[in-house]
Image: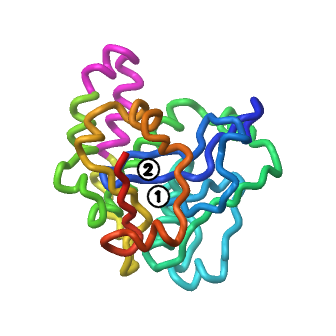
Amino acid sequence: MNRYGKVSDAGLLLTTFYTVIFRCGGLPAGECPEKVSYVSSVISCLALYNVRLILLKRGFIFNRYNIIYHDDVDLSLDMWSHGYPSAFIPVVIGVHYWSSTRKRMSRPFIEYESKRGAILLYKRLSKFVKAKGLLTPYVRELLYTIPRLALHGQERTSIVTRAFLDAMSLKVKPLTGPYEPLLLDIPFRNLSHSLSKLVKRSKLLTIVIDKNALQAGRRPFIVPYTP
């Protein structure tokens, strides 16, 4: 819950085209289904981890390349690739003041780490996501450079561009497990619309993924979704 009485998110769902859906994000708690649901990643502000199992499978908890954002996503997806799922449990036990930590950090630092972390995560995931063939994050980055410059000015644009280039120059290990992480397989034609419209129209925010949904996939952990 956030301080406004709404769900910040109940974990996140990642699509095969590397788009993110924050489950129940922005909804009143009463509109989020009261069912346990698998998610691609839990959010570490309030998460329970099996530390012994994590250390056994990957030797560390959080990846040192992901400092602010994406460290928890990287952890969850890596464990999914070993066959150990992440799940959301619908119990409200506290309020998350997410800005209380980041307000002590400079905005340029946050923007840099956010962009760098996203690209590094994509590089680790690339053998699983369809976006690999489309080079989606890279093409999108080039398309956004000019409008970003017009909207946010040269300083912010240079920070984000540097983060992108730095991430591209780093070598990161792909996810090491034999399975795919939990990914939603949404037909590409439905992603041609803005994601916000897609979410509102198809009620993706409140989707519940249980064992039956997992077993309906063509491959382990790739869940088909047709609005």
Does residue 167 lie above or below 47 as drawn? above
Q: In the shown orientation, is residue 221 left or right of residue 211? A: left
Residue 34 against residue 31 in the figure, above or below? below
Residue 80 percent location from the top left of the image: 48, 72
In the picture, which quadrant includes the C terminus?
top left
Whole-percent x and y of residue 180? 37, 71
Q: Does residue 10 appear to the left or right of 4 in the view shown?
A: left
Extreme residue toward the bottom, this view: 56
Q: Give the residue at x 62% y 34%.
A: 26
Task: Check disc 1 and give the amino acid type.
Answer: Tyr
Question: What label does residue 117 carry, if any?
Answer: 2
Kindly report which numbered mark, 1 or 2, lies closer to the viewer in this rendering.
2
Residue 136 is one of the magenta-drawn residues: no
Q: Nearer the viewer, residue 17 or 96?
A: 17
Residue farthest to the right, as pictured:
93
Viewed as shown, does residue 123 lie left or right of 201? left
| Of callouts 1 and 2, the N-terminal one | 1
Quadrant assignment, res 42 = bottom right
Q: Are marks 1 and 2 in contact (CB under 8 Å)?
A: yes
Residue 151: in magenta span: yes
Numbered disc 2: secondary structure: helix
Answer with left or right where residue 44 lies relative to residue 202: right
Task: Identify which residue is drawn at 49% across, 60% down.
Answer: 40
The segment highlighted magenta reads: 145-165
In space, the residues marked 1 and 2 are separated at their CA atoms by 7 Å
Q: Which of the labelled discs sits on residue 65, or is there none?
A: 1
